[in-house]
Amino acid sequence: MARRWTACVLAVAALGCGSEGGPAMPEVAPELAAPVAQAPEPEPAPPEPGVRIEPIPELSVLTASLVEHLRAIRATSDRRQDDVFMKVGDSSTVSRGFLECFSSPDEVDLAGREELEATLAHFRNRHAGSRDSYRRVSRAAHEGWSARHVLDGDPSPLLQEVRAIRPRFAFVMNGGNDVEGADDYRYAQRMLRIVEGLEANGVIPILSAISPRRDDPETERWVERYNTVGWAIARARRLPYLDYHQLMMRLPRLGLAGDGVHPNIYPVDGRGRACVLDEAGLQYGHNARNLLALRGLDATRRAALEGADGSPDPPVEGDGTAASPREVRALPFAELVDTRTGGSRSIDRYACGDADESGREIVYRLVVDRPLAVRLLAVGREDVDVDVHLLRGEATGAACVERADREIEATLEPGTWLVSVDTFSEGGEARAGEALVVLSPRVEGPHGLD
């Protein structure tokens, strides 16, 4: 009996005991019973960090994907000359103060920057008796020109210059005159055509911000918007970008001549010395631009021709569908999308509008932890029609706050927001295709400008 009772005690957790197996198990005192394991309370999820505002560097970071793209452009054509560059722009590019003095060694003072010597020499004096890239007068640059002038004609001045000198690289800075038109949407379309026309011919564009305009307050209000578009094109196309504007904003008198439009030059003994790059010289607009341009050319040449490695690319989160929006962790943000193949086809209509949006949409998600003024822009090709929608909340059940054909300017309160770039349909046909999406901080002031 004792053996049977012991067996019953050992088996009680699994089987229990009763009259068929012997006497019933006596009750166990509560203070002797084993405690029942309780599931731990789940730890509260840490708050999701809000979107960051990241300054644009003076010289863009050459990431691995950017470097790969530069080499792909080079592989497009073996008829280009690796030691030749061209210039595209307006009066600030035509000026003798831009790069020309690099052609003469006795005009140059690198102020100890020996690492730039190889690139400086690489593009100097290609052929005896002919002008090198520094001194050449470009057919694609002219006083008073906008991006439209660069593209006008058949062949265009852009293509004429490519054919004339067969360059591998191109400095591109249009916009100083375009701002007077106060239409950065059209400017973006034209700049994309310039950049892609160069790439298609095996020429690597190096884009540059435009300088401040102090001759006209109304024109100056548009400069930052145009520069954001220029940066966005470089970012989306994976190209080098020189933020000349922020460099000039730190200079005395903004590095501008008396007209408030054109960069000034360091004067030495009564003459301009634009390639003196010491501390005194770099207080002047053209000198500062020449150093930035040479640094950009050096980094681009090494990456495209010498196999210099790029830095790691930031991770991409989300595929841009309604179910998995693209996560935007930092502003400004830009990418090229194609609504013929990208994103999803989940949303046909929005509560904040009655337009037929039955084409594909690309969706972005932003978490905001403080009031944030933003500008949301979508630039379609000439035959592409995409609209912008601002939604409050998560992907499921998000409420539509605003819709616009091209751009939305709004102040986002803390919380989760979605931006949907959707394809407008007309007569049952979606006007889909490529579009440039730009999400950026908004400059306060009338019409979002200052």
Image (cartoon, rainbow, N blue to C red):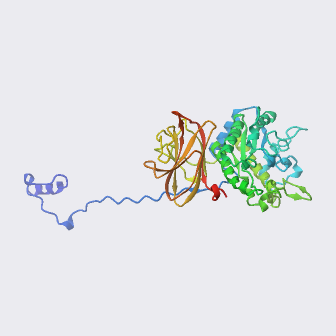
Please provide percent x and percent y for residue 28: 16, 64
Q: Is residue 231 above or below residue 129?
A: below
Q: Is residue 157 above or below residue 300?
A: above
In this rendering, position of residue 243 left or right of residue 437:
right
Work out whether residue 271 or residue 414 is closer to the camera in this orientation and state it: 414
In this rendering, position of residue 116 left or right of residue 230:
right
In this rendering, position of residue 25 left or right of residue 113:
left
Q: Quadrant of the C terminus?
A: bottom right
Work out whether residue 101 or residue 320 is closer to the camera in this orientation and state it: 320
Q: Is residue 27 above or below residue 125?
A: below
Work out whether residue 252 or residue 404 is closer to the camera in this orientation and state it: 404
Extreme residue in the bottom direction: 31
Total marks placed: 0
Residue located at (84% from left, 50% from top): 97
Work out whether residue 178 or residue 224 is closer to the camera in this orientation and state it: 178
Quarter of the image where one finds residue 253? bottom right
Residue located at (85% from left, 52% from top): 108
Q: Quadrant of the N terminus?
A: bottom left
Quarter of the image where one finds residue 57? bottom right
Please provide percent x and percent y for residue 440: 60, 52
Quarter of the image where one finds residue 371? bottom right
Please provide percent x and percent y for residue 32: 20, 66
Please provide percent x and percent y for residue 444: 63, 59
Residue located at (43% from left, 49% from top): 397
